[in-house]
Amino acid sequence: MSANAETRPVPQGAPPKRRLRNYLLDTRFQLKYTGMVVLVTVAVASVLGWFAYDHSRGQTEMMAMQIAMQPDLNPEAAADLTGFGEAEDRKVLLSIVLGILGLAFALAFTGIIVTHKLVGPAYKMRLLLNQVAEGKLKLQGRLRKGDELQELFEAFANMVESLREAQAREVAELDAAIAHAKESGIDERDLKAIQEVRDRMNAALD
């Protein structure tokens, strides 16, 4: 979007619009997985559909042979029966094609939703891991109900909480050491480096 593009304000309290790109956090993985499932299912459904269509055509051909073996049958009635059989074959073929297309669409939609429930938590955990690597020991948000990797996230949250508690104890020990040093008459300028370290460690807890 260009810098000059008009931005429309979103009414406060309005829920965010759900769009396809909101569900495609890892496009390559999600489309690859979904595509594989859809292709395999469509292939199997096409084979089964062909057998069903071939069976229908076989029934129509048998009916045509029986009609041919009855020379006394009214030609118009024979033509009507033959046309009816061919129309039914077309209906079977159309039903098979539409069924396969509907199945493919449903599987594609379901695949994106299912992979989103896996990729979404993995994406969020990657962001949180980067925050921890930067020294920020505070979790921002939790996984949504229904997301996968709940147990892994809980283990990660417990690890961050343990690191947070350990660092809080170290900050408290530094505070006590700095206070004791000041009481001992040490110049605050000599404690500046230690105080800066203490401040950085404390900032990671905010």
Image (cartoon, rainbow, N blue to C red):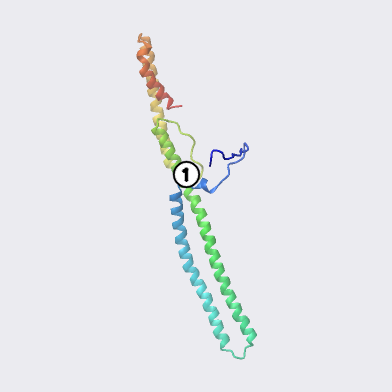
Q: Quadrant of residue 152?
A: top left
Give the labeled residue for mark 1: 120
- Relative to 134, does residue 118 appear above or below in the rendering? below
- Residue 73 or 154: which is nearer the viewer? 73
The percent coordinates of residue 94 (x first, y second) are 56, 68
Q: Residue at x 46, y 54 (%)?
A: 34
The percent coordinates of residue 12 (x first, y second) are 62, 36
Residue, far top = 185
Q: Residue at x 49, y 38 (%)?
A: 142
Count the numbered circles shown.
1
- Relative to 117, does residue 84 appear above or below in the rendering? below
- Relative to 158, does residue 199 appear above or below in the rendering? above
Residue, far front = 4
Q: Relative to 186, is 99 on the left or the right?
A: right
Identify which amino acid the numbered label 1 is placed on: Gly
Residue, far bottom = 72
The percent coordinates of residue 6 (x first, y second) are 59, 39
